[in-house]
Amino acid sequence: MSAALAIAGVELRRFLRDRSNIFFVFIFPLLLVLVLGAQFGGGGGNGRVAIAGSDSALRTAVVTALRADGVTVTLTGSDAMRELVARGRSDVGLDIAPTAATAFDSGKDIAVETITGSQQGAQAVLQRVRTAVGGLAVRQGQLAALVGAGVGEPQASAGLADVSASVTRPSLAIVDIDRVAQEFSGLGKFDLGAAAETLLFVFLASLAGSSTLIQTRRLGVMARTLAAPVSAQRAIVGQALGRLTIAVFQGAYIMLATSVLFRVSWGNLWLSLVVLAMFSAVAAGAAMLVGSVIDNDGAASGIGVGLGLVLAALGGCMLPLELFPATLRTIAHITPHAWAYDAFAKIQRHGASLVDILPQLGVLAAMAAVLLVAGTWTLRRSMARAL
Amino acid sequence: MLVASDLVRRYGDLTAVDGVSFHIDPGETYGLLGPNGAGKTTTISIIAGLIPAHSGTVTVAGQPMGPREVDAKRSIGLVPQDLAIYPELSARENLAFFGRLQGMRGKPLTRRIDEVLDLIALSDRAKDATKEFSGGMKRRLNIGIGLLHAPTLLILDEPTVGVDPQSRNAILESVEALSGGGMAVLYTTHYMEEAERLCDRIAIIDSGRIQAEGTRGELITLTGGLDYIRLTGEGQIEAAATALRGLDAVVQVVADRRLLTLTVRDAPAAVAGVVTTATAAGMTLGEVEIVRPDLESVFLHLTGKALRD
């Protein structure tokens, strides 16, 4: 087994030594997650509001109320606020003019300008803004009325606070009847992109890395390995282990980096790692097959990248499976990507248990078994050719 | 140390190795001398246990050898003709990897790597990626990997192919030192000078068969004390060859484009008649060379063709 581990270790080392991999393995996947999250990701939490206007009691009160409601608030200038909304980086923009601030201070009616973005969910965020501002206006009006009736302002404020604390507010559960919205519920801004890019790059790295298997044969290292006290079986296990190590490394890196940098939630981490391991086994088997059937490393690399991109596109790694027509979604499940995507979706969005994802794991295991057996058989034949 | 008996290996209709038998004693350097395609590499692939023989047996240090005889392979160090090293890895990393394949670990492996790096004069470049190395340095590393686990039989398959003269000389000196250390060496080459310089005994191999075997002196006696005259020129080469075959002193004539190689008795005495006859037949001579017997002559004598054909 130590010979197999030595072979696997050297394959990973060669993979990491390839300078072109520094970009394609470490940087490019994160850039894509970032871009996809920025373009298509949900806002996370209860929306994003950009507030323009100078510091005032009204602005402070609105910010406090919105943040208490789980809304992400950004304080900025008027032009910047409009740009944030226009670019989709904020759901709602709020411009608090000095007159509104003054009216609030004197307990009069206030009017603030709002700008609503076009993205899904912006209207709901606007409603949260209306509720917050309306609540403040009511409270301020109540305070003015009490002071007008002769109650001291400190006593009036304290009384209103006591009343507010003693009242149990009604909660409103909004049931989303949109199927697609339900599918994506529970996802953070970068969660979807991170899962999809993990699958895409694990398979791409494995298939592109199949060229090193060809180089090992062509350089004569395979022959030299077999001239050492290493059986053909162990040499093959070592190569399979090497492909698996590369795939798991690529996937684990993306999972770790997106967790740290983008706070992506992978749900139950151990379950997600099981899915990654199973999907990596499929990728390793495919890499062995490509690296054994093809004798030209340049051709293998090109075919690997092309095949990897096509399978990823079909498997929901470029456009979410949920947006596929029903027929295409069925066809997508000839790819391992679609099964792994489904498993990640269940874990990330719905807190699935091992039992819940057993069907997906079973299909991935079957795919891995078929490809690893085929890869082993063709590798043995290609080794004979190399000798 | 090594006994190969009646080895046969076929590829379809082609018999690449046809009844090859020889043995090598401890501390002996044994040469397989033959042109490209003679069956040298196939023979050592069988001996190293990379491919099976269709018939015949190999034993190394008393153990039978074959693709499934994993333990017996510990006795062998193979230096293949290809540069079987990883270009992305350093010399040290390559040695460490192949050392692990041999079952070496920890400090003994590190110590042995240092020794081998000294031996192949690569200590100061140990951490550099081998893709930055010159051809000679790569060749030396290729040999170093074969030596790493101190095998009792070292197999070198044309180790100086594509190497500059300086590195070639360094490699040959290393091999000479190895046999002096008691290691048995099987050395294949198509360079006559290397076989003459390094090998205690030499087998001349062609078309998958060993044509003759012995020390250099024993092989040269096979030519019957005959000399060679090489004529280079233009004009009626074939006509000159035909005319020269009629001379009493001429035993054999081999024509190769502008070159005629004559096997003759007493070349200094025969050369005047040879020149006159060739000129008369219409060959315009450019160069005339008298060659005393060597392994090239032996090969020509045995096979009727030049070693570099």
Image: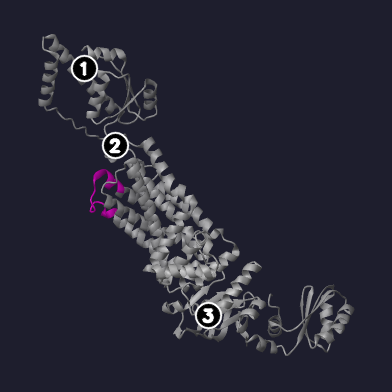
Segment tinted magenta in the rendering: A344-360
- Which residue lies at the image location 81% right of the left edge and 80% below the top edge? B241
Q: Give the vertical position of A66 relative to B18 (above or below).
A: above
Instruction: Name the mark on residue A137.
Output: 1
Instruction: Look at discs 1 and 3 and give the one toward the viewer.
Output: 3
Image coords of residue B85 (percent x, y): 51, 65
Is residue A260 shown above or below A110? below
Label 2 and label 1: CA atoms lie apart by 33 Å
* Mark pair 1, 3: CA separation: 99 Å
As drawn, A203 above or below A350:
below
| Residue placed most toward the observer, A253 or A311 | A253
Q: Which label was assigned to residue B181?
A: 3
Chain of the residue under label 2 = A
**x, y percent for residue B291:** 76, 81
**Colour scheme:** one colour
Q: Kindly state the secondary structure of the residue where label 2 is placed.
A: helix
Disc 2 + disc 1, Cβ < 8 Å: no
Q: Are marks 1 and 3 on the same chain?
A: no
The type of residue carrying mark 1 is: Ala
User: Taking the image as drawn, is residue A333 in sight?
Assistant: no
In the image, taking residue B83 as reference, residue A9 lies left or right, namely left
Closer to the camera: disc 2 or disc 1?
Answer: 1
Can the viewer see residue B291 in this picture? Answer: yes
**Amino acid bearing label 2:** Ala
Q: Which residue is mark 2?
A: A181
Quarter of the rendering occupied by the N terminus of chain A? bottom left
- Which mark is first along the chain, 1 or 2? 1
Res B213 quadrant in image: bottom right
* Observer-nearest of A270 and A372: A270
Discs 2/3, front: 3
- Tell me the crowding category of disc 1: few under 14, some 14 to 19, or many 20 or more residues within 10 angstroms, Cα based: many
Place of residue A270 in the rendered image (x, y in percent of width and height, measured from the top left): 27, 52
